[in-house]
Amino acid sequence: MTSKLSSIPRRHILWILLILLIGWRVSVWLNENENEAIDHAVWASFASVVSGAAASMVGLTVALAAILYALLGTPLIKFLHERGALNRVLFDLMTGAAIWLIALISSIISAHPHSTSQVFWMQVATTCAVAGSLHFLSIGWAFWQLLRNSNTKCDSIPPHNFRKPTDLDT
């Protein structure tokens, strides 16, 4: 069952809501002792770890999109596009990148020395980091299926018929 606005199944949207809920619960569990004053240096070191992981994961999503672009001319991608599965893979990629980007921004905000709500921003960063990690399970599964089935012969690129090495330059 898909939503009327796009070909994204409702289960993908429910999956995202579920992982955000799990991430928020983990974040609340980690910050149970809100009454204790935490030193800013501790916040800044934790925020730097979260922001480093988030920046790496945003880069990973861009790399996965590049792999998808490299497979663009294959019959498998054309078949996935006809079935609408390519839109779902792209939706998962962009959602994962957005979740990790929110984690990156909120961890940077919480590390700022003049931030007044460090606890809130670190809870948002932790929520998005946990949710982004869980979301990569679905992205990893989709790419495993995609790359496992991508060994079909590509007929869209004609073979080159070079007779001499100097023909490469002309």
Image (cartoon, rainbow, N blue to C red):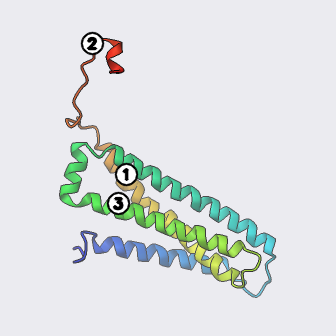
Q: Residue at x 63, y 64 (%)?
A: 51
Q: Nearer the viewer, mark 3 or mark 2?
A: 2
Residue tagged 1: 143
Q: Residue at x 25, y 49 (%)?
A: 77
**Picture layout, residue 135 above or below residue 170:** below
Question: Quadrant location of the C terminus?
Answer: top left
Q: Quadrant of residue 82?
A: bottom left
Measured from the top left, where is residue 13 in percent x and y?
Answer: 35, 74
Q: Are marks 3 and 2 in contact (CB under 8 Å)?
A: no
Measured from the top left, where is residue 85 in percent x and y?
Answer: 25, 59
Of labels 3 and 2, earlier in sequence is 3
Q: Is residue 161 left or right of 47 when viewed as pictured?
A: left
Of labels 1 and 3, earlier in sequence is 3
Q: Residue furthest front?
A: 170
Residue 163's disc number: 2
Q: Residue furthest top?
A: 164
Q: Residue at x 50, y 75 (%)?
A: 22
Kindly state the secondary structure of the residue where label 2 is placed: loop
- Foreground residue among 36 and 68: 68
Q: Quadrant of residue 89?
A: bottom left
Of labels 1 and 2, earlier in sequence is 1
Q: Quadrant of residue 12?
A: bottom left
Q: Nearer the viewer, mark 1 or mark 3?
A: 3
Kindly state the secondary structure of the residue where label 3 is placed: helix
